Amino acid sequence: MMALIQWVTGHPVRVFLAAGFASLLALIALPMAAWLPAGVVALALLAGGPVPAAAAALGAATGLLLVFLPAFGAGPALMIVLAVLLPSYLAASVLAATRSLSFVFQAATVGAGLLVLAIHGLLGDPQGVLMPFIAALEPMLQQVAETLSQFGIERSPQEIGAATAQFAWATLCWMVLLHAMLAQFAGLWAFGKLREPGLFAREFRGLKLGRAVAWIAVAAFAASLGAQLAFGRSWQPADDLVFVLAAAFLLQALAVVHGLRELQVIGVLPLILAYVAVVLLPMALVGIGFADTWVRFRERFGRRPDGAAP
């Protein structure tokens, strides 16, 4: 693996081809694999600097445009490419400058929160903008409603469409944050294989958002709750911001679990259950991640009784 990474990052042409191949490979599982070409870009920036990173970005963009340009036209295709590559490239630039995954995580989370607020500020009624697209999905929503009814959940296509529009923009911003971080994870992991084994594991286990982001989450939740009490309905920008920040704290919770596992505070089973909880009990993990901001589980359980580090 190390030899392959070294060979790929050794020349701009090779990293161009690798990023292009990664973008074509990612198309098989979009949007969940959108981080893959961006991960190559992050690796190129960490290992070789701006020139290989530019070649990787060009290769990734070329691969994506080959598919999306004929399907959607120039404008939408360029927007997709920018959404896939630009946040990750900016995050990788910060990572290359600071060598701190936690700082990148904090900056990317704040950026995703600002993106939420910018969408609401620029569009005015983001849900209303989506309603024509939701209406075009009426047959699909009808199938979803029929499927839910088989499990005893009665929802009309209109209710499902409204719920989809309500959470669509927050989900988009969260996906931008998630893919930007996954790209940094992949790039830092490969860079660690090349230059410093164990680098990614150490940085990931120490991942944290910090109290400033935690207080922003508290303020957003208070604004949403206050609007609910005062006006009988929540404030959507605050709700969307809470959604994005809560999802970020879920990532911190996974880092906490891995940190405690490394300290041998917990075994393998709790680690597996944590990943199961991502799907079944995500709010439990959000609570762990948020509480870690104040309790600092890794530092607390990492101390010996005499106060020395383990």
Image (spheres, grey):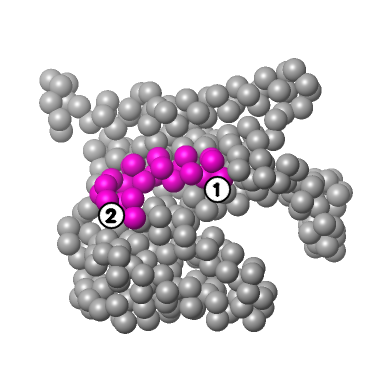
Q: Of helix, strand and loop, which one carries label 2?
A: helix
Membership of 102 in magenta stretch: yes
The amino acid marked with disc number 1 is Trp
Is residue 219 depicted above or below 88 in this figure?
A: above
Report the front residue among 288 and 60: 60
Q: Which residue lies under the disc numbered 1? A: 174
Membership of 260 in magenta stretch: no
| Coordinates of residue 145 in the picture (x, y in percent) | 82, 54
Which region of the structure is painted magenta?
93-115
| Among the two numbered marks 2 and 1 on one chain, the one whose residue lies closer to the N terminus | 2
Whether residue 267 can be seen here: no
User: Going by the image, does 134 lie left or right of 62?
Assistant: right
| Coordinates of residue 203 in the picture (x, y in percent) | 27, 46
* Dot 1 alpha-carbon crowd within 10 angstroms: few under 14, some 14 to 19, many 20 or more: many
Q: Quadrant of residue 267?
A: top left
Q: Which residue lies under the disc numbered 2? A: 96
| Residue found farthest to the top | 230
| Coordinates of residue 97 in the picture (x, y in percent) | 27, 51
Q: Residue at x 33, y 68 (%)?
A: 53
Is residue 241 depicted above or below 93 in this figure?
A: above
User: Going by the image, does 140 lie left or right of 102?
Assistant: right
| Coordinates of residue 296 in the picture (x, y in percent) | 33, 27
Q: Of helix, strand and loop, which one carries label 1?
A: helix
User: Going by the image, does 40 lie left or right of 87?
Assistant: left
Task: For marks 2 and 1, give the CA distance.
Answer: 23 Å
